[in-house]
Amino acid sequence: MPVGARTAPVGARTAPVGAEAAQGSAGARQVGARAAQPVPEVAPVIGERRQLINVAYRLLGSMADAEDAVQEAYARWYALSGGQQRAIDSPGAWLTTVAIRVCLSQLGSARVRREQYVGEWLPEPLPDPAEWNGGRSDTIAFDPVDRVTLDESVGMALLVVLDSMSPAQRVAFVLHDVFRYPFAEVARIVGRTPAACRQLASSARRRVRASRALSAPTARDAAVVRDLKRAWEASDINALVGLLDPQATAVGDGGGLVSTLRRPLRGGETIARHLVRLPRRPSGTTLVECTVNGRPGLVGREGGAVVTVYAFDVARDRIRHLWAVRNPEKLRSWAPSSAAAWTTVP
């Protein structure tokens, strides 16, 4: 299902979206000042932030990069003169166009950065704020406008498939298939013809369908992850093999900062034996069931800190894919101010 309807159509009248980039830092300071106490004419613009974050995260697979892209869009907006702002029929559409074009630029440079990345690169996993907050005052604070809607379009399986696409394919698919943008609007934003955008989205759609990545989680998925947790803790290799698909894969991402799998593992039995052979976890380390990108997952905690986030793709009661994100730079969203925020699910 689509994440949400666009708050405004991409309008006909828009100011140039690239010429004001040089004034970005000054505009960024204005964003913070105005966002803190939005005045009536500013509030509608600030109100676009959550939608922009949702689009940018799905395009980039990184919350940090998504926030940077959205901040840049706001910086360019506030760099416009008052007259230029008033000449824009739909500020929300203007911001969306700028943010998406910034994302396109980031996706292009990401290819170069990935070549220098140590080990496998995985999307940044996101927690469910409801699990973290739970009405407590001692947990990390989530600003509602910064929350990403956790539905099937942010599942780790889909984000991994999206990351394998070209930037143009990814943008066309996310805008049209997830956010329901007409191809005419997608074409205007990315600078291609509607026919070309339709072809890009169609190609991306075939890849997504082939991967079976776009499916809603089921109650049974949580039971499978729970059974894996128990089998892993018991070092029960037979149970692990039974829970893993014979063609399962396991991928780790440490970013060169912490130890993890050097290369992907393939085969359920191979993965099961690897899990059993892992060194015994330090005293006080626990596995906790949680929601990862809207689906059942696990986190590994040491001394109250989350050191690993495990995401899974479950199909027909077996785990097809296991992703272990250990890069601490990708776990900042998982840092509550108190270890008491988490309780182990029995």
Image: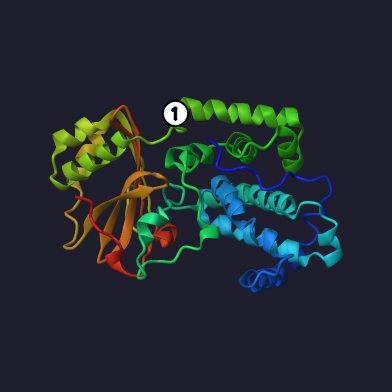
- Does residue 192 appear in this view? yes
Q: Is residue 32 left or right of residue 259?
A: right
How far from the left and from the top, in percent, is residue 30? 69, 72
Of 72 and 339, nearer the camera is 339
Residue drawn 85% across the image and 57% down it: 87
Q: Say above or below: 28 vs 69.
A: below
How far from the left and from the top, in percent, is residue 203? 60, 27
Of 97 and 159, nearer the camera is 97
Is disc 1 surrounded by few (<14), some (14 to 19) or many (20+) residues within 10 Å? Answer: some
Label 1 amino acid?
Answer: Arg
- Does residue 255 appear in this view? no
Of 109 and 171, nearer the camera is 171
Q: Quadrant of residue 197?
A: top right
Q: How many marks?
A: 1
Q: Say above or below: 101 vs 27.
A: above
Q: Quadrant of residue 322?
A: top left
- Check disc 1 and report its element: helix, strand or loop: loop
Q: Say above or below: 133 vs 151.
A: below
Q: Which residue is mark 1?
A: 212
